[in-house]
Image (tube, rainbow, N blue to C red):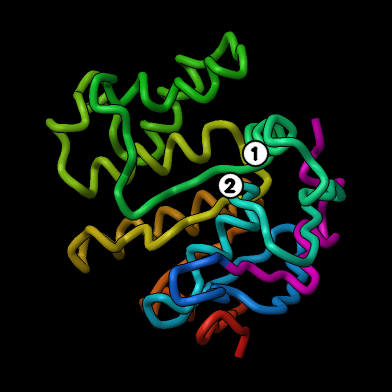
Amino acid sequence: MHTHADLALKNIIVAESLGKAVQTSEGVLHILRSIHLCIKSGESIAIIGESGSGKSTLISLLAGLDTPSSGTIRINGHELTTMSEDGRAAMRNELIGFVFQSFQLLPSLTALENVMLPLELGGDKQAKSLATALLTRVGLAHRLSHMPRQLSGGEQQRVALARAFVTRPVILFADEPTGNLDSKTGATIIDLLFELNQENNTTLILVTHDQALAARCQRTIKLDSGSMV
């Protein structure tokens, strides 16, 4: 296991000449072109841009969910582009947490079981106590046994935050985390996201179209038609 202290101030993500192109009936479509990025451990970064500018593709590549057409990505010193699918999956499990716009909770599991799941997959014997503590931290101690459908959108997103942070990820990717929430609920979620982030010294990479939210990050990266502006 890496301690967060070891990672302080070093480049946790380095992307060089990153490109993504797909073949379409009209020819080759360049979704991203020559992206260069250095992200330091513990940094918070907002990725902004119009719909279709390549934001979600970029985080898919950085998280190892998708492979680039050109260029290289190193995460915590590991070269993603030469890893197998299994290698990338193992790296994600060890280092990365996710929060999505569509909360992506498993509907057949309770709030507690949803948060315990990533720990159980990793064989953690303290899954229940750790998950309970984190759900309490996000204000859901009274909702542990509720199913996702019994929770409001804001409560579901708090469960998703707890699930993302419970494995103590080194990097957290959040893709429009407030996209399905009203502004008041969204603001609460964002406060919580930044608090948890600081408590855990996580590197935060946030995709958003919300300028106020982007302004809370240390750095903003703007994409326009697949290129960094």
**Exactly how many numbered labels are in the figure?**
2
Circles 2 and 1, Cβ within 8 Å, touching? The answer is yes
| Tag shown at residue 83 | none
Residue closest to the far bottom: 229
* In the image: residue 228, left or right of residue 174: right
Check if residue 4 falls in the magenta segment. yes
Which quadrant does the N terminus fall into? top right
> Is residue 159 or residue 57 the one in the foreground?
57
| Start-end of magenta stretch | 1-21
Write down the residue under mark 1. 92
* In the image: residue 61, left or right of residue 31: right
> Is residue 33 or residue 43 the one in the foreground?
33
Write down the residue under mark 2. 65
Q: Residue at x 57, y 51 (%)?
A: 172
Q: Is residue 75 above or below residue 97?
A: below
* In the image: residue 154, left or right of residue 12: left
Q: CA distance from mark 2 to mark 1?
A: 9 Å
Callout 2: SS? loop
Q: Residue at x 87, y 50 (%)?
A: 77
- Res 155 → quadrant: top left
